[in-house]
Image (cartoon, helix red, strand yellow):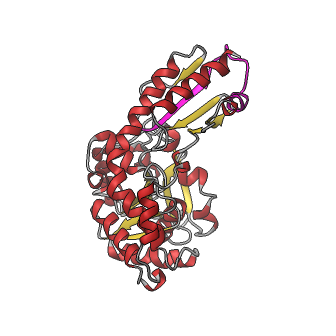
C-alpha cells in the first residue's frame, strides 16, 4: 500500500528531473569557490530574492544560525517570536554556539510580531543590558498555521528596526509559499530585509539544502561562519543541481499544494468530531484537533491512520498538523479524509 505522507513537506523526494540534473552536474571544490553549479545556484537564489549574493548551506537551521552569528557578537541580543522555529526547534544554537541572548515576544495569529512589542523590547544603551542587534522574523510561519505576512509588514518592521540600528533576518524556509499565496514576487516580500534563508528541500522537493542571501559583505561573514560550523562542502554541485531545478521549476506550482490543503480541510470539516482551526488554510498546512466526542489521543488516532496508509504529524495531545506537497495528489487527499472518517468512528 502506498503511503500518503502528510507529516511535513520535508518528506518530499527529488523529482526525476532533479535526479537527472544531479547525475549530470558539473562540479568542483566549493570550499575553494570552484564548483560552478553551486555558484550558479547561489547567484540564482540571490537574483530571485533581489539580494547581492547567496550562500548554499546543508540546512535551514545552519542558515539561520550562520545569519545570526554573522549579524551578532557574543553577548548581543536578538528579538524573535516565542513560537518561531529558531527559538523552538534549532537546539538553542544561537546561544550555545554563538553566545547570543534572545528576547522572545509573543507571535500574533498571523505569525508577525506586534510593532509596539518590538519597539518596547529594544534595549537602551545601558551597560547592565545586552545590546539589541537583530530582529528575526519568519514567513511563512510554521507554528502559527502556515500563515504569512505581506510586504507592507516587512517594510514597517524593518523600518522600525533600522531606525534603532538593528539588522533584520528572515527565516524564509517557506518564503515561496508566502509569495504564491499573496500572488507577489518573493523579492517584494524581502526587499527591506538584510538577510533571508530559503529552504530548497521542503515544498520545492530538493533532497537537501538552503540558501542564505544578503549583501556581499554579509555573505562574506556568513561564509566564514559556515566554515566554523563544518558546513563547507566539496563537490556540492551534485546537491546544488537539484536546488537549481527546485528554483526554476517548482516555485510556480506551490499554489497546487495550497489548493489541495484547502480541499483537505474542506473534507475533514465534514468528519464529525474533528475540529479545524477557523478559516481556510493560509498555505499548505492544515491544523486540526480531536473534539471532546472522540475518546482517543492524537497519537492513538495517528496509529490508526498509519494502519490505513496515512501518516500525519502529531503536534499536541489531541492536535495534528497535515502538510500537502508535490507527492500528495488529489487521490491522496481523498484517502486521507476517508481514513480520518474511519478512525474517529472507531
Instruction: Tell me which corner region of the image, top left, top right, bottom left or bottom right, holds residue 115.
Output: top left
Front-most of residues 315 and 310? 310
- The location of residue 154, given as percent across then percent down, is 32, 50
In the image, taking residue 239 as reference, residue 54 lies left or right, namely left
Front-most of residues 340 and 176? 340
- Picture residue at 41% right of the left edge, 73% below the top: 38
Front-most of residues 314 and 153? 314
The answer to whether residue 117 is seen in the rendering is yes
In the image, taking residue 289 as reference, residue 184 lies left or right, namely left
- The location of residue 253, given as percent across then percent down, is 35, 45
Q: Is residue 289 above or below residue 102?
A: above
- The location of residue 27, given as percent across then percent down, is 43, 79
Is 188 a magenta residue? no
Q: Quadrant of the C terminus?
A: top right
Q: Is residue 221 above or below residue 275?
A: below
What stretch of residues is rendered in magenta? 283-304
- The location of residue 104, given as percent across then percent down, is 54, 49
Amino acid at each position: 500500500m502506498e503511503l500518503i505522507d502528510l507529516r511535513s513537506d520535508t518528506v518530499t523526494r527529488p523529482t526525476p528531473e532533479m535526479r537527472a540534473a544531479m547525475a549530470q552536474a558539473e562540479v568542483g571544490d566549493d570550499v575553494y569557490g570552484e564548483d560552478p553549479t553551486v555558484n550558479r545556484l547561489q547567484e540564482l537564489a540571490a537574483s530571485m530574492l533581489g539580494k547581492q549574493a547567496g550562500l548554499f548551506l546543508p540546512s535551514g537551521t545552519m542558515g539561520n544560525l550562520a545569519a545570526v552569528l554573522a549579524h551578532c557578537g557574543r553577548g548581543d541580543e536578538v528579538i524573535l517570536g516565542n513560537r518561531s522555529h529558531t527559538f523552538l526547534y534549532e537546539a538553542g544554537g544561537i546561544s550555545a554556539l554563538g553566545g547570543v541572548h534572545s528576547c522572545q515576544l509573543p507571535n500574533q495569529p498571523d505569525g508577525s510580531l506586534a510593532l509596539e512589542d518590538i519597539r518596547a523590547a529594544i534595549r537602551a544603551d545601558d551597560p547592565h543590558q545586552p545590546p539589541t542587534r537583530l530582529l528575526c522574523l519568519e514567513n511563512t510561519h510554521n507554528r502559527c498555521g502556515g500563515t504569512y505576512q505581506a510586504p507592507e509588514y516587512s517594510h514597517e518592521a524593518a523600518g522600525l528596526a533600522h531606525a534603532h540600528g538593528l539588522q533584520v533576518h528572515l527565516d524564509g524556509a517557506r518564503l515561496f509559499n508566502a509569495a504564491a499565496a499573496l500572488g507577489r514576487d518573493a523579492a517584494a516580500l524581502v526587499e527591506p530585509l538584510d538577510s533571508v534563508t530559503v529552504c530548497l528541500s521542503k515544498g520545492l522537493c530538493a533532497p537537501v539544502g538552503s540558501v542564505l542571501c544578503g549583501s556581499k559583505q554579509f555573505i562574506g561573514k556568513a561564509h566564514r561562519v559556515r566554515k566554523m560550523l563544518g558546513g563547507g562542502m566539496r563537490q556540492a554541485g551534485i546537491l546544488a543541481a537539484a536546488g537549481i531545478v527546485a528554483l526554476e521549476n517548482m516555485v510556480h506550482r506551490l499554489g497546487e499544494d495550497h489548493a489541495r490543503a484547502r480541499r483537505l480541510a474542506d473534507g475533514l470539516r465534514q468528519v464529525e468530531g474533528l475540529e479545524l482551526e477557523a478559516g481556510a488554510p493560509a498555505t499548505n498546512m492544515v491544523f486540526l484537533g480531536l473534539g471532546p466526542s472522540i475518546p482517543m489521543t492524537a497519537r492513538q488516532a495517528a496509529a490508526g491512520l498509519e494502519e490505513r496508509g496515512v501518516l500525519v504529524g502529531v503536534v499536541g495531545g489531541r492536535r495534528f498538523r497535515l502538510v500537502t506537497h508535490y507527492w500528495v495528489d488529489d487521490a491522496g487527499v481523498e484517502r486521507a479524509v476517508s481514513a480520518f472518517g474511519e478512525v474517529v468512528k472507531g
